[in-house]
Image: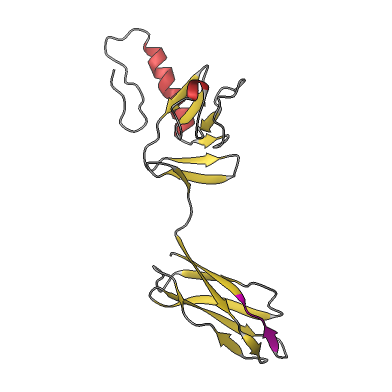
Amino acid sequence: MTTTPHLSLSYIASSQAQKEITHNAAINDIDFLAKASVISTTVATPPSSPATGDSYIIAASPTGTWTGFTNCIAGYYGGWTIKTPQAGWTAWAQNTNRMLYYTGSAWALLTTPKIDATTIWNPGTIAASSGATSSALAASGAAFGDFAIVAAPYSLQGVQATAYVSAADTVVIRLTNLTGAGVTLASGTWRVRVIKA
């Protein structure tokens, strides 16, 4: 019996008896795969009393009927149906409230492409209504039009911190003293995240 190429749903053969069994199995498969929402990604042993429709991404070193199916999706419909994911499949993980995608070899967090950079910087004293700019931080892949955010290592005491792409693969941090007096900031590790537009 042949199956569909992406979800491995069984086709109904023209002369097949009890066609409803194949049809209903395919509906169950679609039910837990089309909008995959798994209870957990850390369970390796099939739960003893699952409810109909319970689904899991099988964790490493599985046991019982899940043996040999690490990273597969298991759905319970009177018994466990196990599907091997293909690259690009997505699933909502209820245990972490995160969206995951299958890379072809593992499940990974689905996030906006981003680039992180850090620098140790000592801004020193910044006069009232003045500012300071860090030296360039390497951020391979950063380009004009990308978003940039900065995380300071301590309280900024009223100083505003921004980050921006200053050239290809480069970001800088800009501090602006919005207070009415000079502010002295210590050395620390500053982090910048560039979010690809």
Q: Nearer the viewer, residue 61 or 74?
A: 61
Magenta-drawn stretch, dominant element (helix, strand or loop): strand
Q: Residue at (69%, 86%) from the top-left corner? A: 184
Q: Residue 13: percent from the left, percent from the top?
A: 28, 15
Q: Nearer the viewer, residue 188 or 73?
A: 188
Q: Is residue 187 magenta?
A: yes
Above or below, 55 against 115 in this view is above
Quarter that holds the C terminus: bottom left
Q: Residue 188: percent from the left, percent from the top?
A: 62, 75
Quarter that holds the N terminus: top left
Q: Residue 7: percent from the left, percent from the top?
A: 37, 31
Q: Nearer the viewer, residue 157 or 67?
A: 67
Q: Residue furthest top?
A: 17
Q: Residue 112: percent from the left, percent from the top?
A: 47, 57
Q: Residue at (56%, 32%) from the top-left corner? A: 43
Q: Is residue 170 magenta?
A: no
Q: Residue furthest front?
A: 61
Say whether residue 35 is left or right of residue 128.
Answer: left
Say whether residue 92 is left or right of residue 34.
Answer: right
**Range shown magenta:** 183-188
How many marks on residues? 0
